[in-house]
Amino acid sequence: MIPKVLLVDDDAAFRELLVDILRADGYELLEAADGVRALALATQHRVDLVLTDQRMPGLSGLELAGRLAALSEPPAVVLMTAFGTIPQAVEAMRAGVVDYLTKPLASPAELRRVVRGALGVHGKAAEKEEFLTHDARTLEVLALADRAATTDATVLVRGESGTGKELLARRLHRRSPRARGPFVAVNCAALPESLAESELFGHERGAFTGAVQRQRGRFELASGGTLFLDEVGELAEPVQAKLLRALEQRAIERVGGAAPVAVDLRLVAATHRDLAGAVAEGRFRADLFYRLNVISLELPPLRERAGDLDLLVPALVRGLAERHRLPAREPDAEAWTRLRRHAWPGNVRELRNVLERALIAGTGETIRAADLPPLDSPPAGGEPGDDPLLLAEREKRAILEALARTGGNREQAAHLLGISVRTLYNRLREYGLR
């Protein structure tokens, strides 16, 4: 199958140069002069790679990449820029951005190398990331999820941070009748309270200061597909009320709007919190909880399926090595021992971060124990149990360790732990840490 590449730049002469270089390689090429047109083309066509300028009128390259990541089959994205901050932006995005090019082009060969590499990464990603597990409990969750996928029932996914709640939501989407529609993911913990309503439901022009044009919210963007609300328990009560109305009426009202807008979507919500307990404490609406909790799926933490490390570690190492163009080095015996003894409070996300650091920092033919960051051992007397006090103590130790390793930088510590900065601040308050 011939790869389809979409070229996005408001400079027609530069687009023509890209076409001249890439046409000889046999790609099917599409062109767009701005991000809005590019998004429309990517929605209409099955695009494998988007090569986009960063600075454009309307949607920037990063904003376009974020919108493309919401498609049911998102393309790989390569950013082109003449500005110096793009390596950090690429690292921050992670949602489809696989590489970057500086303008003017260093050479046609460099363009071809980056395009081939990006298409190679996308080809492997197209196989779709799946759960790797031998664990009987996790397999039962996946079987129930697959049965639920064929329906339009609302699903609530519960589990600790890093257990794969979004991965499960994407599986539900792919196996549903809505698979050809958009998959839109929203991290509710990352939404500022003042903007949450606008982000979810959109706004009309002039609805508030800075609303210079109408904007569709995530509900409208997900219409025809699946909306995934991660950390739904972090939403403020007024937004909870509007979310409940939207689910019951299958319609939303934009901020500043007078008429309802019909939406047709399947909702998957996720939380690491005890929502039933939050209802009892008056922090979460009972009627919304019952509306979300139609099908309940709970993902076990990694410490309760430690046997899955034998599947996860080699797969993660291969993927990370390809991404960073490094040799895929397996852990040696001592490193494996340390990996198996760790409690993994950040679950698979923490495991991925640890392996990524080890691959980049290490220089030998294997991943050695010295390449790994400091890892806690389980408490004396056996494997970690389910005692809430022990779990809380491990989480507290993990937070302190992450802060120590990052010199007190909370944003970096949150990334290391695989949680949002807002969640980290909440934990610091809960544990009385300063």
Image: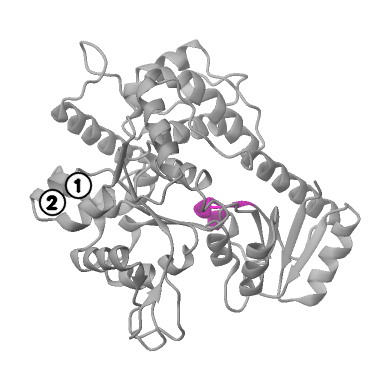
User: Is residue 216 depicted above or below 136 in this figure?
Assistant: below
Q: Is residue 175 left or right of residue 84?
A: left
Q: Which label belongs to residue 275?
A: 1
Residue at screen point 23% across, 63% down: 240
Q: Which label belongs to residue 279?
A: 2
Q: Position of residue 38 (x, y in %)?
A: 66, 69
340 or 25, nearer to the observer: 25
Task: Tell me if I can see residue 284 in this picture.
Answer: no
119 or 238, nearer to the observer: 238
268 or 366, nearer to the observer: 268
Instruction: For label 1, count other residues whose C-alpha is less than 10 Å away and answer few (under 14), some (14-19) or many (20+).
Output: some
Which of the 4 image quarters holds residue 283?
bottom left
- Give, as a single range, the part of the protein colored magenta: 88-98
Q: Position of residue 267 (x, y in %)?
A: 38, 55
96 within the magenta span:
yes
Residue at screen point 56% across, 27% down: 315
The amino acid marked with disc number 2 is Val
Q: Position of residue 401 (x, y in %)?
A: 29, 34
431 within the magenta span:
no
User: Is residue 329 depicted above or below 69 in this figure?
Assistant: above
State yes or no: discs 1 and 2 in contact (Cβ < 8 Å): yes
Residue at screen point 55% across, 23% down: 314
Residue extending farthest right: 24
Badge 2 element: helix
